[in-house]
Image (spheres, grey):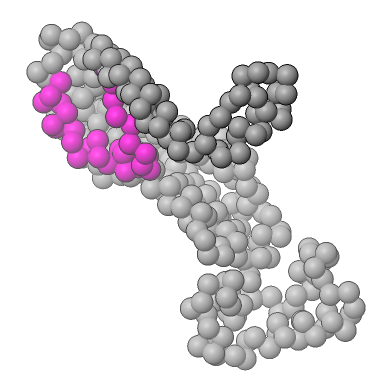
């Protein structure tokens, strides 16, 4: 900010206003605090007095859903006392008293952590690329298992499963949607409403299906490179299922492959020697980057 005056004069040399403009950080702070801040506060207070508003909390979506469920009864009681006098509250009141709407929140409370936890994991400061492929396959497998017949699911054929093929789906009444949903379905006013339950189940299946489609669009479950990188996870490096040679890596990663055959052979020898080291000596408790 202390350089803005000089910058303005250089940018607009033909402007008398820009040439005479003088403001550094102390004056700017005074303007914001005593002029702009005061005016904006008065304007905001005036708007809030005339219009309804809600407070948006910057939290993970699943946490917000859980908070709503925790305060559901209190919110319902509040709007019970308001809806007769305020027509704008009637729709909120109706939905808070609808057990099917609450079932949707229970479903989201159960389902959303599956995605938010995965996102948080990949935002870690640690090296996680060696676990990325397995994490994504596990996520996809878990979602597929929710809606599809067990006999249609093979771990080595996950990338071949078409999430839009309804012929692979379980019977709608057999699909698990969380204990909260089951609790709501046991309520007398819900249990007898077969059509509402079927519509709810159908919508939840669509949600899961769209998640599966989204994963398939953004990630290749059969990506050979990421699949190979997953074997560089410290624990995988010394497992019996590890590849016995790095030859496959040399093909997939030509730009970082040693230039000479002798160097390739030396690196391959070191890789093959890992199996003879103890896990303690190798420091497998360290993150991949340290290992």
Q: Is residue 247 left or right of residue 140?
A: right
Q: Is residue 23 left or right of residue 170?
A: right
The residue closer to the viewer here, 79 or 5, is 5
Residue 121, image x and y in percent?
48, 56
Residue 123, image x and y in percent?
51, 54
The residue closer to the viewer here, 126 or 274, is 126
Q: Quadrant of the N terminus?
A: top right
Residue 41, image x and y in percent?
32, 23
- Which residue is drawn at the image coordinates 61% and 77% (left, top)? 237
- Which residue is drawn at the image coordinates 31% and 39% (left, top)? 64
The residue closer to the viewer here, 40 or 255, is 40
The prevailing secondary structure element of the residues shown in magenta is helix
Q: Locate residue 8: give its quadrant.
A: top right
Q: Is residue 101 left or right of residue 170?
A: left
Residue 183, image x and y in percent?
20, 40
Q: Is residue 186 visible?
A: no
Q: Is residue 124 positioned above or below 37 on the image? A: below
Q: Disc count in the image? A: 0
- State which region is magenta: 52-79
219 in the magenta segment? no
- Which residue is drawn at the image coordinates 63% and 70% (left, top)? 231
Q: Quadrant of the C terminus?
A: bottom right
Q: Is residue 230 positioned above or below 44 on the image? A: below
Q: Is residue 130 positioned above or below 274 on the image? A: above
- Which residue is drawn at the image coordinates 43% and 47% (left, top)? 116
71 in the magenta segment? yes
Q: Is residue 24 left or right of residue 85?
A: right
The residue closer to the viewer here, 169 or 127, is 127
């Amino acid at each position: 900010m202390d350089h803005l005056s000089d910058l303005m004069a250089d940018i607009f040399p033909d402007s008398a206003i820009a040439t005479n403009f003088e403001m550094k950080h102390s004056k700017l702070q005074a303007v914001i605090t005593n002029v702009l801040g005061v005016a904006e506060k008065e304007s905001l207070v005036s708007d809030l007095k005339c219009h309804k508003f809600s407070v948006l909390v910057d939290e993970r979506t699943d946490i917000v859903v859980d908070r709503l469920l925790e305060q559901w009864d209190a919110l319902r009681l509040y709007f019970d006392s308001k809806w007769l006098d305020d027509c704008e509250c009637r729709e909120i009141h109706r939905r808070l008293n609808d057990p099917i709407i609450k079932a949707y929140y229970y479903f989201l409370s159960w389902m959303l952590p599956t995605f938010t936890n995965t996102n948080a994991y990949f935002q870690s400061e640690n090296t996680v690329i060696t676990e990325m492929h397995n994490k994504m396959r596990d996520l996809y497998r878990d979602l597929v298992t929710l809606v599809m017949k067990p006999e249609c699911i093979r771990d080595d054929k996950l990338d071949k499963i078409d999430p839009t093929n309804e012929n692979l789906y379980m019977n709608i009444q057999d699909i698990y949607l969380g204990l909260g949903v089951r609790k709501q379905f046991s309520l007398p006013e819900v249990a007898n409403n077969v059509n509402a339950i079927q519509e709810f189940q159908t919508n939840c299946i669509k949600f899961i299906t769209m998640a599966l489609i989204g994963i398939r669009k953004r990630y290749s479950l059969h990506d050979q490179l990421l699949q190979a990188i997953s074997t560089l996870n410290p624990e995988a490096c010394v497992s019996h299922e590890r590849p016995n040679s790095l030859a496959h890596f040399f093909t997939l990663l030509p730009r970082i492959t040693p230039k000479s055959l002798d160097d390739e052979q030396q690196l391959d020898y070191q890789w093959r020697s890992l199996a003879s080291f103890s896990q303690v000596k190798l420091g497998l408790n360290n993150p991949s980057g340290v290992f």
